[in-house]
Image: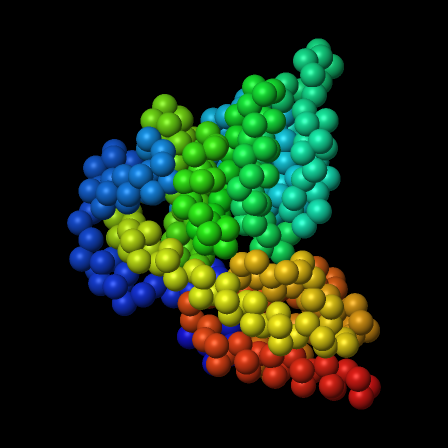
Amino acid sequence: MSDYIMLRSDTETQPTPEMRRAMAEAEVGDDVSQRDPTVLRLEAIAAERVGKEAALFVPTGTMGNLASLMVHGGRGDEVILDEGAHIYINEQGGMCALAGLTPKIVPAKNGLMDPAALEAAIRTDNIHYPVPKLLCLENTHNAGGGRVIPPDLFRRYCSIARSRNLAVHLDGARIFNAAAAAGVEVTEYTREVDSVQFCLSKGLSAPVGSMVAGSREFIAQARRARKVLGGGMRQAGVIAAAGIIALEQMTDRLKEDHDHAKLLAELVKDLDCFELLYRPVETNMVFLSTEKTGRDAYTVGRELLEQGLDVTVPGKQLIRMVTNRHVTEEDIRKAGSILHAYAESVSRR
């Protein structure tokens, strides 16, 4: 690992020793022909874990989301999303460019939509309008500061969609973080939706891969969509083996990452030159505004890196820090000290 305190992302996690051994020893076959026994085992475990009939192993979360949307809707059909949704903001417009779907955006605050605004966004049948087919939800919500949609609100969103004959897809890249933070089983969320995508390669520490889960019919169609998107893999059991370890061993430890993020927030909440955003911190993300430093976040990020703290800069005046299993409490306290020292240097300028 890097000598820096690595808070860029939980995508920086390395596979565990158990994962590396499992990968080296994995029994493999041709996954395109559904003949890789390790992939088949991973898909069965994933489906059971989220309470669905079937699951599909895909290389990335972006592909998993796009394949799901392609199954749920056809060209010109309308997809309802909140304004900060990862599918809308951070997946290069694939829903439009490749699937031909039309986004309908709902205002949101920190990743949470007003149910009334959601209901108002779903158009009635009119020859002039696209046909609304799908509601996409994101939990946890990245751009909302790692926000967790409370289970009761999540159920309300899904109920609204059902009442208007919309299917529901969950971008659950970090759904196990959401479940851990909400203190519920992951199925409390996944049973409400028609399909779900979740990542194995973030806080769960697998090196590659995401899962899509839904009904058997849905997954059969998603498998075709994966193929046309170039996601058909051959001896994929080599990487699927790590995904099995991720689901069996890594979900129960996510609360530790959340506790570390909350500690970091506590250490920096009173710094004059930074503003702690998205309070309270709920999962493994801490966002700071750099506006009061008088410097853009790119400069701040570069200067923090020189001091040994590696962060992400998702906006001109925004830095993001994400905890993961490699970051210890000692690292968090060192990160707090670096940020305090930086704040003092800003005050002297």
Quadrant the N terminus occupies: bottom left
Q: Is residue 284 above or below residue 90?
A: below
Give left or right: position of 159 versus 46. Answer: right
Q: Residue at x 63, y 60 (%)?
A: 280
Confirm whether residue 83 shows in the render: no
Report the number of discs: 0
Give left or right: position of 91 versus 11. Answer: right
> Residue 68 or 190: which is nearer the viewer?
190
Give left or right: position of 283 versus 268. Answer: left
> Residue 79 or 265: which is nearer the viewer?
265
Q: Position of residue 160 (x, y in %)?
A: 61, 27
Q: Is residue 22 above or below residue 196?
A: below
Q: How is the image coloured?
A: rainbow
Q: Residue at x 47, y 65 (%)?
A: 257
Q: Position of residue 140 (x, y in %)?
A: 54, 49
Q: Residue at x 82, y 86 (%)?
A: 349
Q: Position of residue 200 (x, y in %)?
A: 39, 52
Confirm whether residue 181 shows in the render: yes
Q: Position of residue 271 (x, y in %)?
A: 72, 77
Q: For the view shown, which residue lies furthest in the top direction? A: 127
Q: Residue at x 60, y 20 (%)?
A: 164
> Residue 191 or 174: which is nearer the viewer?
191
